[in-house]
Image: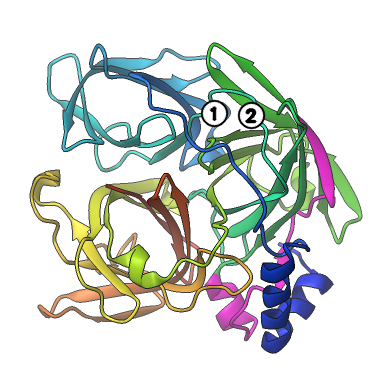
Amino acid sequence: MKRKRSPIKFSLRASFPVALLLLALTAVTGCGGTKSQLTILPGPPPAAEVNSYVGQPGDSPSETSLWGVTIDRSKNVYSYGPTSGGAATSGSIAILINNFIILLGPNGYQSGLAVEVPGQAIILRPGDSTAPLVFAVQQPSCFAIGGNVKFLYALSPGINGPSSPFFGQIYAATSSDGSGWQFNNQTNYVSPYQFAVLNNSNVPSAAEFPGYPADFPATCSAAQDAATVNATPLAYFNDDANTFSVPTQFVISPGGLFFENQSYVNVPLTEGWQYTNVSAWGVSESPLPLPVGGVATANYLGFLFESYPSSAMYRTRLVGFGNAPISGTVMNGGTFPSEDPTQAPNLDMSVTFNTQDPLNNGQYYLAKLTIPNDAPSTFTGSCLSYGLSQTGNSTCTDDGVAMVGEQNGLYTIIMSASDASGNQKTLVLFQQ
């Protein structure tokens, strides 16, 4: 896949002192496009008993429809499935320890798991550990925002290859009534493995195809307490020589959780783009830097989703992190015994945040994810490095990008890591 360089981003990142100077000027004056100091999101409304979310499974390159997820706590029932075509899956729920939900099948046995931030977002495993993770967001209305809000996102797992787009950012502004939206400066980057090992750089200085126009309009529409923002920007391929329209849906919670889906059905295979749909999962940029000491010591519940697209294999495991002192910038956690979050999680995984990006509050693009080397023929067969845990077990470490957002005083962490073959591991955590 071809890549293009962004002269503006390259010049800002090429000189660290210049970047710090621009950062300081932006923080003082509130001007410029680097920071979002003066932007205002309305904040999440009080959670209702019935909440509906829109998103997509993590293997979205093969999906042709958005998914809807509804959790009704008044009746203790759930439903989920594609919004266009196909019957929804439904059943009853059992709720343990606040936001952890067990989905029950017709026979009363467990048929899935979910972690919900009621009224904002949900992460859902619709089945056993082989089911792809679903990330879905609730946007109850066409709300207005103040200023130009930056969103940081990871491309959903299922995209394969070291040079595929991996993470990115986009800005959004609205009209005074929230019906009209304007998006600008959407930029995708390759994985840390690509820009560190192959490009001999420790910063994401090269933007990745497809590219997008500097800005493009969108329209918000709402019905029955649910809204989506729709746009049709152009995507640029072949060194900007070819452009194709890409129908796009955004779902953004008032607290700043972000979902984007883009359809590439109009892009011919001759452009080397092999995916029908690609979704992005993200958070709004914090107005201030987020010290690791505060982020990593909080208590989180979520999922680790691993993809092995060449064999259409996925692994999704319930995990818990934090709630303990940290060592440097390392947050420890792991899987739960028998997937029971009432027990203490195993300490068999870790996230090393390293340095926060001085141009993006809450983004750590030098992060590392360490997990057990327990699937060497599939999910952990191309790890960037291997080691030994304190108990002597083999570990797998990959480079990644962690994005942290804050909603109502609680953190959300979305992290993607990539191995040498481009296979992704995505960690999604909601603070409890």
154 and 419: which is toward the camera: 154
Residue 213: in magenta span: yes
Q: Residue at x 42, y 70 (%)?
A: 291
Q: Is residue 343 left or right of residue 248?
A: left
Res 44 seen here? yes
**Three-letter residue code for mark 2:** Phe
| Residue furthest right in the image | 241
- Give the SS element for disc 2: loop
Q: Does 225 appear above or below 389?
A: above
Region of the chain picked out in magenta, as a range: 192-219
Q: Is residue 15 left or right of residue 356?
A: right
Query: Can you tell which quarter of the image residue 379 is in?
Result: bottom left
Q: Is residue 327 left or right of residue 227?
A: left
Residue hosting label 1:
139
Give the colour scheme shown: rainbow
Locate the N terminus by quadrant.
bottom right
Query: Can you tell which quarter of the image residue 117 is in?
Result: top left
User: Could you say where residue 347 lies in the image, as x and y percent from the top left?
Assistant: 16, 66
Residue hosting label 2:
143
363 and 393: which is toward the camera: 363
